[in-house]
Image (cartoon, rainbow, N blue to C red):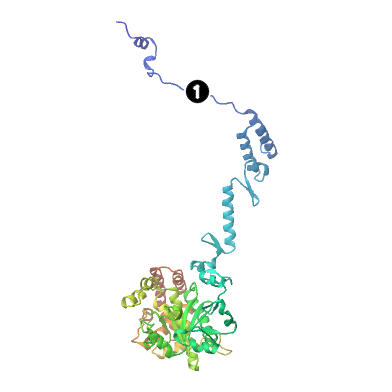
Amino acid sequence: MRPHLASILLLSTPGLLHANWPPTHTAAPMVAHPADADYDKRKAEAGNDVHKLWKLYEWCVQTKRDKEGKATLRQIVKLDPTHKEANVALGHVFFDGQWFPTAKKLDEYKKEKEVAEKKAQGLVLWKDQWVPASDVPFLDRGLVRDVNGNWATPAEAKKLEEGWIRQDLEWIPPAEKENVEKGLWKCGGKWLTAEEADACHADIDRWWRIPFERFHLYTTCDRDVAVQKVKRELENAYDELVRAYGGEPAGPIGVLVLRDADQYSNFSNGDDSAQRGGTDALGLSSVHHAYFADASHQATNEERVLGLGVGYWDASSDTGNRWGVHSVRHALGLSFGEALDPSTKTYEKNKKSPLRNDAYWQAFYDEKRVPRWFRYGAAAYAERYYRDNSVGVGGDPLWARKWSIGNIHARGGLRQLKQILDFNLTVEGAQDSEKLINEAGLVMAYVLDGGNAAIEPKLKKLQEAITAGKDKKAVTDAAKALEAEILKSESDLKKFAGL
């Protein structure tokens, strides 16, 4: 039998037994293109001479060497970033004295420059627009600048554009503006003289609503008393409260000042004959000469007075004028504290229901972040531990502080600081509770004016937590740290007070 041809080849061809079978295809070897000797020679001759490199680029253009031309341009701008012709040829964009490789890079530069310039001007970015940092609290509340440049709601700004004007907080339509120009005041739907308006606004349900820059004053006092006496004390007390809290509310706060003690009692307890409910759920109006109106009262213009400090100023006697100073100052302190520490969640949850039961009040006060001693202490400080810079030559600017400390001494001296900080304010112990408020004011006076180096940083941390709106835990932790330092300083506090 004849052998197979493949077998003969395998046996007769040396090395074939060890070759791969079947044979694989082998690609043809790559052939390198010859180097561009002419370009390389010219490039070497040009070296780092920008003028010669530009000539080399022009030769590349003429000989259609695009790749080499771009490489040459990049070398030129590396050596001379300001070379105009090379930058233009590369498609770079000139702006602000420099060249940018792409429009995107230019946009990034413009944005960074704008941010730096705006920040240098004291502006901040708010919803894609640059605004003064001081405007942000107002913008966050949805306010706008009206035609007079003042902050207003959009609805208010629209009214001003339409020709309406404001008389205090009352809107007057264009057709009635002439009455304002005549010096008349609107009350109960009628235009009255100043004397008649005082009589009209003396009614609880039709009080004056007078706006000032930092607070709105609701009052049944005669307008002259409100503007010339009450306003001065509120302005000075406001400054003391800013010191206590380390900041202030974002907008004007409200405060209610009634014309005498009888009206004060009537408003707090309610009046069945006038179908007016009480405004003092805890009954604390009987403890002091100012209280916090935690319950609601339906007033004119459907305005709900809720969460305001209430005081009174009886201008009919010297005694009434003297006590009025302390009452309105304390009332503002309670309004100030509520503005920084409102029970928003509890109120919003229950605002549709007129009923207020024990569970509501428990939730309302449990929501508070600021310790009770601090809130009342700040109000008492503004009321009676302030420095009176209005005294004449030879007068004592600390007369109110000394008088208050004298009251504490006359009533058995200062109780333990732990008891003051626990601040168990009750109606049952009226006189003792009044003294407790005074003692909280003294503690606040020591914290603010005592010069205790250990207390100062703890106070600052608490103030920052309150004004920044931090949660209850953060405020409570900061308060406990401050209270611990106060308790360590009992002897120093008594020395500060002269007790």
Q: Which residue is mark 1?
A: 29
Determine if residue 451 is in view. no
Residue 424, position in %: x, y?
35, 81
**Which image quadrant is residue 413 in?**
bottom left
Q: Is residue 10 above or below residue 230?
A: above
Q: Nearer the viewer, residue 244 or 123?
A: 123
Q: Nearer the viewer, residue 368 or 357?
A: 357
Residue at 36% across, 79% down: 422
Q: Residue furthest bottom?
A: 317
Q: Residues within 10 Å of mark 1 (few under 14, many from 20)?
A: few
Residue 365, position in %: x, y?
36, 76
Residue 238, position in %: x, y?
50, 79
Image quarter hosting the N terminus = top left
Q: For numbered disc 1, what is the local secondary structure?
A: loop
Identified by mark 1, the residue type is Pro
Image quarter hosting the C terminus = bottom left
